[in-house]
Amino acid sequence: MSNKEKIRIENATKVFRVYKREEEPEGAPVNNDSGQTRGKVPRGKIPRGLLPRRGMSSSTGGMFGKEREKKLSVTQSTLYALRNVSMEVDAGEVVLIIGPSGSGKSTLLRCINRLEDLTGGAIWIDGKCVTEEKTDIRQVREEVGMVFQSFNLFPHLSAIQNIALSPVVVRGMSKKEANRNARALLDRVGLGDKEHSYPAQLSGGQQQRVAIARALAMDPHVMLFDEPTSALDPEMIKEVLDVMLGLAEDGMTMLVVSHEMGFARAAARRVIFMDEGEIIEQGDPAKLFNNPDEERTQRFLRHIL
Ligand code: ADP
Ligand code: MG
């Protein structure tokens, strides 16, 4: 392992069990060719809420009792959101992840900061395994800042309160120091005059910049961005991307899910294309966007470019 390496992901696999209540033909469990397995869930193991309720009108036309129970059953399918994903990100590197909806991009980021747990494989940050059972999840979240598509600011807190909250609550920082840092961060994202504004009083672009400042307040080693501009009106995209470009120039290690080609060309050293939970190909932005090797990458790029 090189000492420049910040993030190392080895064979990350994430399986979701998906339950569906449906009319099920009699017979054995079915395997389909996308690798999903389906099977009847034993009655005792059906998650609550999926059990047919008594007297409920169902898609089979409101049958009751035994007849309905026989025809309506709960099936379980296994969905590979991530399948043996391996990659490394060096210190100060900006890596862009692209791929169609449902390809596992968010799941990958969520597993890095432990919003989800991997089913298999492991992730290291600064040489420390963050996916072990015994790892302190709170510490992982302190080291890994995450910015979501939907800002997720606390609506009842002002901009500065949103930013200063975690350092005080989680880090035990004094309120005074946390506020001083928060003001500096608001300046850094170009919102020095908005410290007392509440999220509802801010534009989407401004809210997202507060969200970035809030993540930075914990002094993270790594920043993850999950489609940070895709909920924004076009005229606000640039102000958020500019903040991210500034971070990249300051040497922050960043993993960014985005389809903003301008940002990719300006900031990303590497682009990774994912599909169906797998890394299909990766390379420098110019090569991957202009001359991808894989047919699936070509097809995807034709859709978005
Ligand atoms: P992307 O961010 O690339 O659009 P996601 O990582 O959100 O994709 O999802 C990957 C796959 O995992 C999708 O098929 C999605 O439906 C599924 N998935 C994500 N989260 C869950 C969950 N909590 N339960 C079941 N399936 C999920
Ligand atoms: Mg996503």
Image: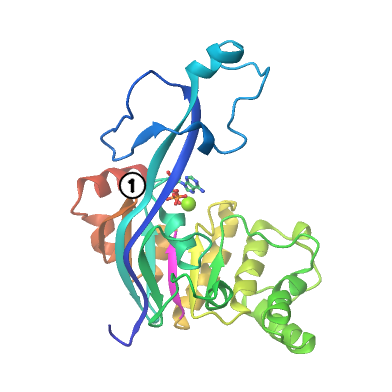
Side (left or right) of 95 relative to 252: left
Q: Position of residue 72 (x, y in %)?
A: 51, 20
In this picture, is 1 found above or below 119? Answer: below
Asked which quadrant contains residue 51, the reply is top right
Asked which quadrant contains residue 194, the reply is bottom right
- At 68% from the left and 79% from the top, the residue drawn is 170
Outermost residue to the front: 44
What main secondary structure does the magenta stretch of the protein show?
strand
Side (left or right) of 68 relative to 8: right
The colour scheme used here is rainbow
**Viewport quadrant of the N terminus:** bottom left
Q: Is residue 256 magenta?
A: yes
Query: Which residues are the magenta region?
Result: 252-257
Side (left or right) of 216 relative to 276: right
Residue on which disc 1 sits: 276
In this picture, is 161 found above or below 250? Answer: above
- At 32% from the left and 45% from the top, the residue drawn is 300
Q: Position of residue 282 (x, y in %)?
A: 26, 62
Mark 1 C-beta to ligand 1 under 8 Å = no
Q: Is residue 221 magenta?
A: no
In this view, the residue in front, 145 or 12, is 12
- At 32% from the left and 72% from the top, the residue drawn is 88
Q: Crowding at label 1, few (<14), some or many (≥20) Cα neighbours within 10 Å?
A: some
In this view, the residue in front, 116 or 173, is 116
Indicate the amino acid at tag 1: Glu
Q: Is residue 77 in sight in this rendering?
A: yes
Q: Position of residue 11 (x, y in %)?
A: 30, 63
Q: Is residue 265 in sight in this rendering?
A: no
Outermost residue to the left: 293
Element under label 1?
loop
Tally of numbered discs? 1
- At 69% from the left and 76% from the top, the residue drawn is 166
